[in-house]
Image (tube, rainbow, N blue to C red):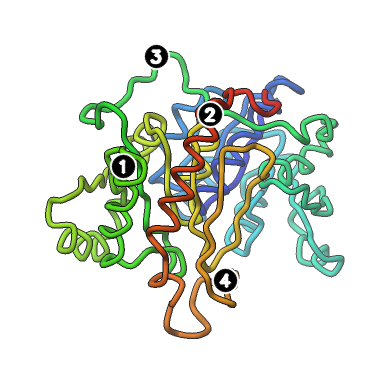
Amino acid sequence: MKVLLVQRRALGDALYTAFVAEVLKREVGAEVHLLTLSSAIELFSSYRYLDRVVPYGGLLKTAKVLRTERYNWLLDYEATFRTYPLALLSGAKRRVAFYRKKRERLLYPLYTDLVPYDAFGFTFWDRLKLLQPLGVDYRKYLGFRPRWVFKEGTKPPRGLPEGDYLVLAPKGVVPSKEVKPPLVPRLARELERRTGLRVVIAVAPGEKEYLRQLREVVAGKFEVFSRPLYDFAFLIKGARAVVSIESFPYHFALAVDVPSVVIVQGYPLFFKKTFGLIEEYRVPLDCVPCGGKSCKRRDYACTKEVDPAAVARLTENLLRKTASLSPSGSKNF
C-alpha cells in the first residue's frame, strides 16, 4: 500500500501531518509520502517514518510527479481550491478529505471518501480521523503524543551554538504573529537575566526586512540565527527552552521534549495542556486572540505590547517545573 499525505502549506500543520506516517506504518505497513513546502524538504526527508517527501511545484508539474507513484490512497489534510484538482490529477485510487459543515460535502466532488471533522483538543489527534476509511482504529491513538525521530545516519549541521542556550523565535509568516523588532532585545535581556541562559534569536532567512530591522536594534548584543529549516530544527532540539510566537518552533519543540513559552497574539494556542511542556503568555488586550492574519484594529497592538518581564518570569518558572519532568511525562509512541 502506498499513501500520500497532502499538506502543501503551513509548517506546523505539515509537522503534525507528517506524524500521521508513524500510525500508518504501525497499522497498515504502508509506504508513506508527504507533499509539502519546498523549503521543508530537507527536514521532513530526515523523519524516520516518511519514505519520500515531494515538494509542491505548481499544479501540473506536481500532478505529473504524483501520477508516476501510483498511489493507493491520498489523504488531503489541506483540502483547498489549490489541492482539489491536485487530488484528482494525482491518479490515486482513493482520495480522502475532511468536511466541517454538511454543505461542504457538495464542494468535494473530487474525493472518493469524505470524513466529518472532529476536534479532539490537539492538532495531531484531529488529523487521525482521516485514517478511518483505511480501516485504522484512530481512537486508540487519542492521548498519545508524537515524537520527532530522525532517520539513522542523520547528521546535524555544523556551526550550531554550544553549551546551554535558549531560543527566542519572535517572527511568524503573518503580521499578527510577531514581536516588533525594537522589543526583541528587551525581551532577550530579560530572558538572560531571569534564566541565566544565553539567548539565540532565530528568524527565517526569508524574513529579510524583519531581519534588517532586527539587526539594527540588536547591534551584535545577541546572536541572530537565520538558517534553513533543517538547521533550525537542530537548534531547537539542542535548546534548554524555546520562547516563540504561535508558530512552528513550539510545535517542533514539543516533539523533541523542549519546554516552550508561547506568546499568544492573533492566533490561539493549539496544544494539549496536559503535556506539561508548554505555557502560554497572552498579550493583555481584550482582542487577543482574534484568529486573524491581519489586525482589525489596524494598529497590531498585540505585536507591540508584549511584557518582557512577564514572559521571562513564565520561562523561568517553566524551566524549574520541567527540570524534574520525565521526557515520558505523557503517553507517547
Q: Mark 1 falls on what kind of element?
A: loop
Q: Which mark is residue 228?
A: 1
The numbered mark at residue 250 is none
**Which residue is painted at 41% across and 46% down in the image?**
38
Residue 146 image position (x, y, % from top left): 63, 31
| Mark whose residue sits in front, 3 or 4 | 4
User: How far separated are the C-alphas under marks 1 and 4?
Assistant: 31 Å
Q: Which mark lies nearer to you, 1 or 4?
A: 4
Which dot, 2 or 3, sits closer to the camera?
Answer: 2
Q: Is residue 83 left or right of residue 177?
A: right
Q: Alpha carbon of mark 2 to alpha carbon of mark 4: how far?
A: 31 Å
Image height check: is 108 above or below 200?
A: below
Secondary structure type for disc 4: loop
The kind of residue on which mark 4 rests is: Val
Residue 165 point in image, percent of width and height: 31, 35
Q: Which of marks 2 and 3 is nearer the N terminus?
A: 2
Mark 3 and mark 4: Cα distance apart in space: 44 Å
Which mark sits nearer the N-terminus, 1 or 3?
3
The amino acid type, in three-letter code, at marker 1 is Pro
Residue 153 is marked as: 3
Q: Distance between the residues labelled 1 and 3?
A: 20 Å
